[in-house]
Amino acid sequence: MSKLYRFGISLEKPLIDAFDKHIRKQNYQNRSEAIRDLIRNELVQKQWKEGGIVAGVIVMNYNHHKRELVSRMLDIQHDFQGLIISTQHIHLTHHDCLEIIATKGKASEIGDLASRLKALIGVKHVNLSITSVGDDGHGH
Ligand code: NI
């Protein structure tokens, strides 16, 4: 853990009341923890907008019986092989598969990969989640 710094924040009463209510619902232990997450989110958004390197996870749900779907999906994954760190495939039901694709690279390229996968016929749902790669004060 890196060194912790303290600083004071002045807020209007209605704003801090609303914030406290919000963070209680999110199960934060204290304001510091909640504010740290807000700052990290802001920095991840900034990296995303500026084309910095981020980590992303694509979660997709598809019907593997759809003709050509699996081979098309693999062709796309090979087109982005420099971006993909690992994939995990889970057989959900007789028809449905869950694929989890971990990536690291430019957010715009990760977004392109997710869009191409989403456009395949037989894909039911694609979700993309982006996080930082760690150079933003996580302290590891
Ligand atoms: Ni499967």
Image (spheres, rainbow, N blue to C red):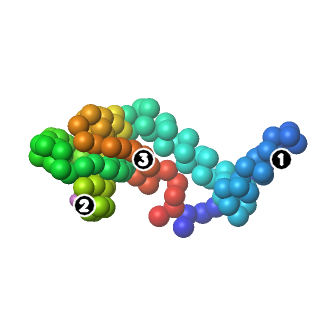
Whether residue 63 appears in this view of the structure is yes
Residue at position x 73%, y 57% from top? Answer: 24
Q: Residue 17, which numbered label?
A: 1
Helix, strand or loop at mark 2: loop
Please report whichever mark, 3 or 2, sits nearer to the chain's N-terminal start. 2
The amino acid type, in three-letter code, at marker 2 is His
User: Of the residues shown, which amino acid type is indicated by label 1?
Assistant: Asp
The three-letter code of the residue at mark 3 reads: Ser
Residue appearing at x 56%, y 41% in the figure: 42
139 lies left or right of 39: left
Residue 94: which numbered mark, if any? 2
Secondary structure, mark 3, is strand
Is the CB–ligand 1 distance for label 2 below 8 Å?
A: no
The number of numbered badges drawn on the structure is: 3
Q: Position of residue 40 (x, y in %)?
A: 55, 48
- Residues at marks 1 and 2 touching, judged by CB atoms closer than 8 Å: no
Q: Is mark 3 within 8 Å of ligand 1?
A: no
Label 3 – label 2 distance at C-alpha: 27 Å
The residue that appears at 33% across and 37% down in the rendered structure is 111
Image coords of residue 134 (percent x, y): 44, 54
Split into quadrants, the picture shows ligand 1 in the one at bottom left
Query: Reading the chain from its start, which is encountered first: label 1 or label 2?
Result: 1
- Local packing at callout 3 (Cα closer than 10 Å; few below 14, some 14-19, many 20+) is few
Q: Nearer the viewer, residue 26 or 109?
A: 26
Residue 54, visible in the rendered structure: no
Mark drawn on residue 71: none
The residue that label 3 is drawn on is 129
Disc with the residue nearer the chain's start (1 vs 3)? 1
Is 32 drawn above or below residue 53 in the view shown? below
